[in-house]
Amino acid sequence: MAYILVKKEEQVTTLTFNRPEALNAINTEMLLELENVLDTIATDPNTRVVIVTGAGEKAFIAGADIKEMLPLSPEEAFKFSCYGQHVLQKLTDLPQPVIAAINGYALGGGCELALACDLRIASANAVFSQPEVSLGVIPGFGGTQRLTQLLGIAKAKELILTGKKITADEAYSLGLVHKVVAYGLAQSAAYEWAVNLANLAPFALTQAKQAINYNAQLLLEQGLQAEASYFSACFATADQKEGMESFLAKRKPVFTGK
Ligand code: CAA
């Protein structure tokens, strides 16, 4: 695989998003790889816990690939959003517990991917944000739904409407992450947690996560459809092109409301 490293140790499978030159930004190829590897893991009796993390110490995942999204039409953006949602839902639906070891920037689609996991451990340098409005779009990989389910409407609106960045400690006080550890230790802390979980009854863990997810899932399915529609509608605007072009050109965007 070009973008995902897979390592298996003691019934713990670690997936590392490995595209450090773009801060591990998620492109379609990476989503395809992720879907394939998740399909394999779902039926692997020797994987009891899964860890996801980013390569390097700077980023977990800095979002969906802005270069890839820039030229999308609304129809293509709808497909991109639905596919990202579908693959992240597979992460949520894995029978095994999934721990996100968040080792740096978890922005946009990166934050959304972490939200699709069962447990989240952040290193002290981790930064969280749903910055999509600053690009002229909205979260499109489930963030409007999962962040709202996790934090409530008020906090989800604060984060998504302002697009502001928060620190690992702020994320911990909000309940967005379960634990904060020192710089560089997210993956080893996740592994320690994973080994403990791997010693518990796997069937019971699966039943527990399915039972907990059940309620949320009923609302999530409809919410994700709505999100993909609202996300793709942004791609008919000049502001989406301006937002993404200005990011890539490293300048401030000028939004006109068109
Ligand atoms: N997509 C594509 N490329 C990205 C990227 C992304 N999301 N994030 C970073 N990169 C690239 C940069 O373009 C840059 O590439 P070049 O070296 O070719 O210029 C490289 O990664 C390093 O990034 P910076 O030079 O910007 O590094 P920095 O340290 O100055 O800043 C950062 C780091 C604050 C994370 C900044 O890169 C940033 O703001 N990234 C974008 C974050 C973002 O907006 N994410 C949301 C995307 S939209 C989304 O995810 C929608 C959805 O829900 C599906």
Image (cartoon, rainbow, N blue to C red):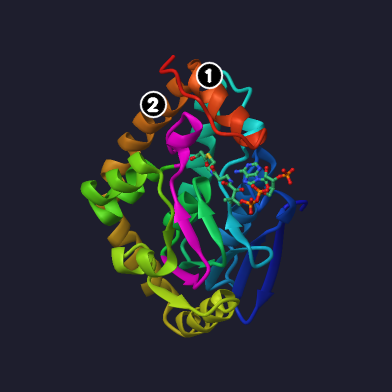
In front here: 31 or 199? 31
**Ligand 1 within 8 Å of the CB at mark 2:** no
| Mark 2 and mark 1: Cα distance apart in space | 12 Å
- The amino acid type, in three-letter code, at marker 2 is Tyr
Foreground tag (2 vs 1) = 2
Say whether residue 164 is left or right of residue 215.
Answer: right
- The quadrant holding residue 249 is top right
- Which residue, given by chain and number where applicable, does mark 2 sit on? 230
Please state, as top left, top right, bottom left or bottom right, where the C terminus lies in the image. top left
Q: Using residue 70 as the reference point, say whether residue 7 is left or right of it.
A: right
Judged left or right of residue 100, residue 33 is right
> Is residue 115 found inside the magenta-colored segment of the image?
no
Circle 1 — which element? helix
Between 57 and 147, which is closer to the camera in this rendering? 57
Q: Where is residue 69 in the image (x, y as percent from the top left)?
A: 60, 30
Q: Magenta segment: does it hold 135?
A: yes
Image position, residue 29 (x, y; %): 69, 41
Q: Which SS class for mark 2?
A: helix
The label on residue 75 is 1
- Residue in the image at 52% along x and 76% along y: 190
Residue 211 in sight from this viewpoint: yes
Which quarter of the picture shows residue 15? Answer: bottom right
Type of amino acid under label 1: Glu
Q: Nearer the viewer, residue 189 or 136?
A: 136
